[in-house]
Image (cartoon, rainbow, N blue to C red):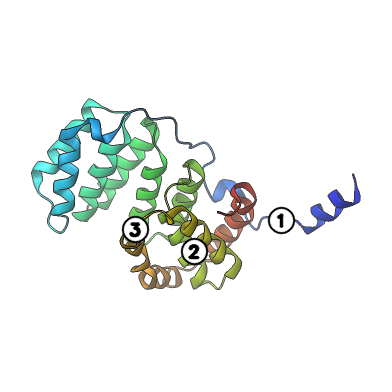
């Protein structure tokens, strides 16, 4: 072993918690050839849902459920089925749908992120962190939302390096996106930080520290 190898090994910090407790390394996105633009029925139902998001209409969930039955390995209907039930505050059903989609579908990272948001809504901090971290490691690094959630939680705990890295990754991903889109999570900053402080556990802090040490080396900066 050379002197540089020796010094770099000494500089590496041991992980404060095992990575198996931080994210599921077996979950990875697979190539998905289907595009939403090719399914006008599903695309229209999603648009209708977004137009009436404060009061989702039953016909939308009928379409989402029907598309899930017709395409059981396509993640998009699972995502919007779960989104519908989350709006109705039926979080347990939403979680079941998302877990089923993660098991069956090629596109998994968006479902992992939605599952993390489900756990966030039900007050389970550690599972929320676990699934945000899984979403990041499973995906193609085009979703900035998990990074902002992780970054704001790190902010709440005074983890400056971890928070800076996560926010920098989010900014790099969202650079070409509109300010209005990015503002979606920025506006929730105080809510995320308050939640993190109210539900703070020693394990949650260690999960965030371990994820930063691992992911910053694996993924780098943007």
The answer, for residue 114, to whether it is visible in the render is: yes
Tell me the number on the disc at residue 42: none
Instruction: Between residue 5 and residue 194, name the one nearer to us.
Output: 5
Q: Earlier in the sequence, mark 3 or mark 1?
A: 1
Image spot of residue 58 (x, y percent): 9, 45
| Extreme residue in the front direction | 176
Task: For mark 1, give the secondary structure.
Answer: loop
Instruction: Between residue 35 and residue 20, name the one nearer to us.
Output: 35
The residue depicted at 49 percent of the width and 63 percent of the height is 151
Q: Nearer the viewer, mark 3 or mark 1?
A: 3
State the CA–CA distance, disc 3 to disc 2: 20 Å
Task: For mark 2, give the secondary structure.
Answer: helix
Specify whether 17 is left or right of 181: right
Q: Which residue is mark 3?
A: 178
- Placement of the C terminus among the 4 image quadrants: bottom right
Q: Does residue 60 sit above or below 11 in this rendering?
A: above
State the CA–CA distance, disc 3 to disc 1: 39 Å
Q: Which residue is mark 2?
A: 151
The residue carrying pointer 3 sits among few (fewer than 14), some (14 to 19) or many (20 or more) residues within 10 Å by Cα, namely: few
Q: Does residue 209 sit above or below 36 in this rendering?
A: below
Tell me the number on the disc at residue 14: 1
């Amino acid at each position: 072993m050379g002197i540089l190898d020796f010094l770099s090994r000494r500089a590496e910090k041991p992980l404060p918690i095992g990575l198996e407790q931080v994210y599921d390394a077996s979950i990875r996105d697979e190539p998905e050839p289907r595009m939403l633009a090719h399914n006008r029925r599903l695309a229209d139902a999603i648009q209708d849902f977004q137009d009436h998001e404060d009061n989702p209409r039953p016909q939308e969930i009928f379409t989402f459920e029907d598309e899930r039955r017709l395409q059981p390995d396509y993640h998009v209907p699972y995502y919007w089925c779960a989104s519908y039930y989350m709006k109705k505050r039926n979080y347990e059903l939403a979680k079941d749908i998302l877990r089923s989609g993660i098991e069956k579908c090629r596109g998994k990272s968006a479902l992992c992120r939605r599952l993390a948001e489900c756990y966030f809504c039900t007050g389970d901090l550690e599972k929320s962190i676990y699934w945000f971290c899984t979403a990041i490691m499973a995906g193609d690094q085009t979703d900035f939302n998990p990074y902002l959630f992780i970054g704001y939680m790190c902010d709440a705990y005074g983890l400056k390096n971890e928070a800076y890295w996560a926010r920098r990754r989010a900014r790099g991903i969202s650079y070409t996106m509109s300010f209005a889109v990015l503002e979606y999570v920025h506006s929730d900053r105080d809510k995320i930080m308050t939640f993190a402080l109210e539900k703070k556990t020693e394990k949650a802090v260690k999960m965030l520290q371990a994820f930063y040490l691992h992911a910053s080396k694996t993924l780098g900066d943007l």
